[in-house]
């Protein structure tokens, strides 16, 4: 007998996302709940970074050390400036080459550095726009476990009661996490190998 999926796991069209579902996800995030979102790499679990309680819950559900920053996803490049990020010429070249897409840029922000990404996935970008803020998003799995390629995988990994809503757009097309690149003073450092190869990153950084 098939095991029924969680009641808070709802299907959404990845190409034409239902506006009512997008709004529901955004409202849940703004009130401090966690929402699992599909992306072009793997499924992610999101919190509104303006809600400290939600970010604390995100760390707890993920089993992640508080010493490790959670990346921020934006709908457009313009949101990075609103979040206080400073992009130098190299970071802008990388953003122009790979965004929207599977590249996380770790750049100066406030007193330190933060990771930012613009995903190439309309569902997630629509939710970010509706929320009115960048979102803190990490892969929807427990730390040290394989990333979730489906919403059902995410529900099993995180516990369906810990997340208010799982948006199910089918299996993630990529399955490989984003490449993470730190950019400081015009120099780049690959912090995590991922969907974009190091040679591609270095070529784009040196262009122009």
Image: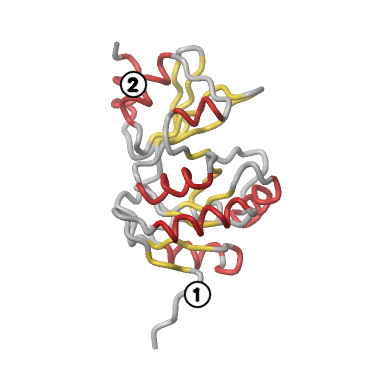
Residue marked by disc 1:
7
Would residue 95 be found to the left or right of residue 137 on screen? left
Q: Rounded to the nearest whole Å, what is the CA distance between mark 1 and mark 2? A: 45 Å
Say whether disc 1 or disc 2 marks the residue closer to the N-terminus: 1
Q: Are marks 1 and 2 in contact (CB under 8 Å)?
A: no
Q: Quadrant of residue 117?
A: top left
- Tell me the residue at 66%/38% (across/down): 67
Q: Is disc 2 surrounded by few (<14), some (14 to 19) or many (20+) residues within 10 Å?
A: some
Q: Quadrant of residue 43?
A: bottom left
Q: Is disc 1 surrounded by few (<14), some (14 to 19) or many (20+) residues within 10 Å?
A: few
Q: Quadrant of residue 34?
A: bottom right
Q: In terms of depth relative to the viewer, which is nearer, 39 or 59?
A: 39
- Tell me the residue at 39%/34% (across/down): 103
Would residue 139 be found to the left or right of residue 150 on screen? right
Is 88 drawn above or below residue 115 in the view shown?
above
Q: In terms of depth relative to the viewer, which is nearer, 24 or 204?
A: 24
Nearest to the eye among marks 1 and 2: give it: 1
Residue marked by disc 2:
202
Percent position of residue 84, x then y: 58, 25
Percent position of residue 137, x then y: 52, 46
Percent position of residue 90, x then y: 40, 16
- Tell me the residue at 36%/19% (across/down): 93
Q: How many marks?
A: 2
Residue 51 disc label: none
Quadrant where the N terminus is found in the figure: bottom left
Is 65 drawn above or below residue 169 in the view shown?
above
């Amino acid at each position: 007998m098939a095991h029924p999926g969680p009641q808070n796991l709802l299907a959404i069209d990845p190409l034409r996302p239902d506006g009512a579902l997008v709004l529901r996800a955004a409202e849940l995030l703004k009130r401090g709940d966690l929402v699992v979102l599909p992306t072009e790499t793997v499924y992610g679990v999101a919190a509104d970074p303006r809600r400290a309680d939600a970010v604390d819950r995100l760390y707890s559900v993920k089993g992640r050390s508080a010493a490790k920053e959670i990346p921020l996803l934006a709908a457009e490049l313009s949101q990075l400036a609103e979040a206080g990020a400073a992009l130098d010429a190299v970071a802008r070249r990388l953003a122009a080459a790979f965004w929207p897409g599977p590249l996380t840029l770790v750049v100066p922000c406030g007193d330190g550095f933060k990771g930012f990404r613009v995903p190439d996935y309309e569902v997630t970008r629509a939710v970010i726009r509706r929320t009115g803020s960048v979102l803190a998003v990490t892969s929807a799995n427990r730390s040290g476990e394989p990333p979730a390629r489906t919403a059902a995988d995410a529900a099993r990994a995180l516990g369906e009661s810990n997340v208010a809503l799982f948006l199910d757009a089918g299996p993630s097309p990529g399955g490989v996490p984003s490449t993470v690149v730190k950019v400081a003073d015009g120099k780049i450092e690959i912090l995590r190998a991922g969907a974009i190869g190091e040679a591609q990153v270095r070529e784009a950084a040196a262009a122009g």
